[in-house]
Amino acid sequence: MISNIIESSIFSEIPEDELPNILPLLKERHFKKNHVLMFENDQSDEVYIIRSGMAKVCRIHEGREIVLGIVMPGDVIGETEALSNDQYRISSIEALENVSAWLISRNDFLGIAEKYPSVLKKAYLILVERTRILNRLVRYLTFYDVRTKVANLIMDLYYNFGENCDNGCKIDLKINQSLLANMLGVTRESISKTLSDFQNEGLIDQHGKYFYILDLNKLESICNETEENPTLRKWHYL
């Protein structure tokens, strides 16, 4: 199990016969849902590799939260600070569900990066992908009306968590309206109204905390003028 996660992580290009030198440096940790793994502006130096579960990357200002992204198994967090002279955390990370992760100290991580240049290359690619995702988030927040924002976010969720089922496509992620609102920088009331509109139009349905897309083509047509390449909707960096 551990080798499978390593193979899909920032360490994936390290030769397999050298992984036994890496594994003893990883410390396994478990976090309950809603636990904050790190706080923005805190000074700490561990790098995390998510083993299971998902967490949100967020920032809080004057009591308002904006969600910058979601990290999933295989994703690494904290590597940017580890590679920087400034070790203050850029953002907070909060578990959306129970999360297991491996922690590695900054010094051990830098030692691995120095020995294996592929780690630095992947760290650079991760930074580029995160910048791309943040650029799209800025565009969502700045230029789109609420209807287009919500349609785009649902399409993002489809490309990252969608699975076919009998009554359409299920977004296999438990998500509430507050989280959706914080991902788009709008009020919960606006999200509620827009989701209700989409349900009345036969675009989506909701059971519990799961969303189902009933008319993918029509939902995607709302996003037609946003110049989105479907492959760019993926949030997984590696």
Image: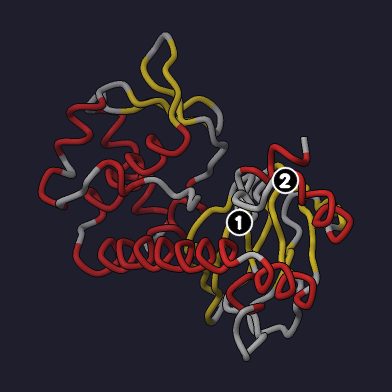
Q: In the picture shown, does residue 43 fall above or below 238?
A: below
Closer to the camera, 7 or 30? 7
Can you tell which quarter of the image residue 105 is in? bottom right
Give the residue displayed 76% in from the left and 80% down from the top.
Answer: 44
Instruction: Kindly report the distance in space between the C-alpha atoms of the residues bearing marks 2 and 1.
Output: 13 Å
Q: Mark 2 points at which residue?
A: 51
What SS does tag 1 mark?
loop
Mark in front: 2 vs 1: 1
Closer to the camera, 26 or 173? 26
Q: Earlier in the sequence, mark 2 or mark 1?
A: 1
What SS does tag 2 mark?
strand
Q: In this view, does 31 lie to the left or right of 41?
A: right
Closer to the camera, 124 or 91? 124
The disc at residue 20 is none
Give the residue displayed 58% in from the left and 74% down from the top.
Answer: 80
Give the residue displayed 54% in from the left and 73% down from the top.
Answer: 59
Measured as percent of width and height from the top left, residue 145 is found at 20, 58
Q: Badge 2: few (under 14), some or many (20 or more) residues near its Cα, within 10 Å? A: many
Q: Given the image, on which type of amino acid does mark 1 rest?
A: Ile
Measured as percent of width and height from the top left, residue 4 is found at 69, 37
Q: Name the residue under label 1.
A: 10
| Residue at the top extreme, as displayed | 166
Colour scheme used in the picture? secondary structure
Q: Given the image, on which type of amino acid does mark 2 rest?
A: Arg
